[in-house]
Amino acid sequence: MNNRRVVITGLGVTTPLGLGIEALWDGLLEKRCAIGPIQQWDPSGLPCQLAAELPDFKLRDYIPKSYRKSIKVMAHDIVIAVVSSYLAVKDSGLTTKCLVDRDEAGDNPVVDSTRLGVNIGAGLICADLVELAGALNTAVDDDGKFSLTQWGNEGMTNLTPLWLLKFLPNMLACHVTIIHDAQAPSNTITCGEASSHLAIGEAFRTIQRGAADVCICGGAETKLHPMAIARHTLWGRLNTEDNATPGQSSQPFGAKRRGMIPSEGGGLVILESLEHAKKRGARIYAELTGFGASSSAKSWNKPDPSGRSLMLAIQKALGDAGTTQGDIDLVNPAGASTPEHDASEIAGWNAAMGETLEETYALTTRGSLGNNGAGTGAIDFAATVMSLDRNTVPVSVNTNNLDEACKFRFAQNDPKDVPIRQAITAAPSLAGGQSAALIIQRFEE
């Protein structure tokens, strides 16, 4: 392998705390919680009626005018990825086809499209219920019952011929590659909450081995959909007891945690080879130095109580970076806020980091943002990079009453100014047992 150094030069996030990395960072510093009653549709028939929703925005402000016709075949997950890609590219100072087509190229040279890759984590995209229900309504027999024959003869014809293209997980990467004309390796990863970390890790390897100079990578997803919320309700993962107190509803690693809160959002980041970044005079946030991944298939929908998968991913990332637990200044755990998933994650971190956890500051965003699946890891990654860049650990909302097994040292009351040279961010999936970890280091020549 050609072990080229890889640096982080752009951060683009679309979150309930705001669009853009500064909006996310300001929201974390201000200890804001974006969780509240669902506003997009009536949730009264569901036991969990809370979510962290994105602010209003117009997609046309983030894509070329010539691409607006494609909006009709974009599910919301795709929209989040497209917006995040634009924000990441703008933040990096790169010029891609998207910026050229929007007349925003400026004096910067256009990136070589054959050396620009895309890796995006995605989730199970839920169908538009209004659109689907309208078609299903035309597929009933004379007794008013759904008929497969009638569906084949008539119902399907009431969906747009491109209907399926709105809901394929690989369409996030598809639209981003087209808009930015990315022709280097592209991939989609669908491993739940571990998806973003795995996508960033694959982009890291792609640049290391010389198959690309720049990669747009991360993840996006929305859990704010009746079908998604119903699915997690049936699995018993949602907090159904705190609808009246949204600000305290998501309690990562809390002693009295009662379940996760659904969310929507995501983030894409720009990774570059150091040589490419220096040649164009890029601003460098940090260096990515290690990646580890693992899986523990104990159950398809329940976590391994030992947290072994997460432990192995962290250990592999540390080894890949050539560093040790004692050299880490900040850890970024997830904290889904479900009793069994948090217990598994605590066990994994404790096994991987040992006593160093109690002396190392930690940051989790789940108390502010809830869980949006494949996009949560990218948001966490961006927040961790900002903490390292600013030498500041924001307060982790709702972490003042932790599980007695939890050794994380979260900032309480006020952000902490802490010298951070190395940080580790890790993500276990809620289902399937996949875990991934990434080591971020302050850039030094």
Image: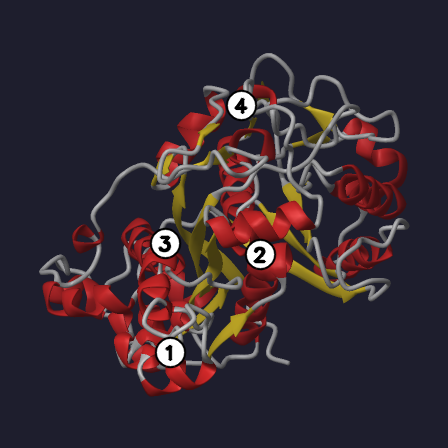
Label 1, label 2: how far apart the Cα atoms are: 19 Å
Label 4 vs 2, first from the N-terminus: 4
Q: Which residue is mark 2?
A: 288
Q: Which x, y percent locates residue 130?
A: 33, 57
Residue 48, by quadrant, is top right
Q: Which of the numbered marks, if any, corresponds to residue 246?
A: 4
Q: Which x, y percent locates residue 145?
A: 46, 70
In this rendering, the count of numbered labels is 4
Q: Residue at x 89, y 34 (%)?
A: 355
Tell me if 181 is positioned left or right of 384 in this view.
Answer: left
Q: Nearer the viewer, mark 3 or mark 1?
A: 3
Relative to 235, say whether 331 is above or below: above
Q: Could you tell me the amino acid type at mark 4?
A: Pro
Disc 3 crowd, CA 10 A, few/some/many (<14, 14-19, 20+): many
Relative to 252, say whether 270 is above or below: below
Q: Could you tell me the amino acid type at mark 2?
A: Leu
Coloring basis for residues: secondary structure
Q: Which x, y percent locates residue 183?
A: 35, 81
Label 4, label 2: how far apart the Cα atoms are: 36 Å
Tell me if 296 is positioned left or right of 88 in this view.
Answer: right
Q: Which residue is mark 3?
A: 80
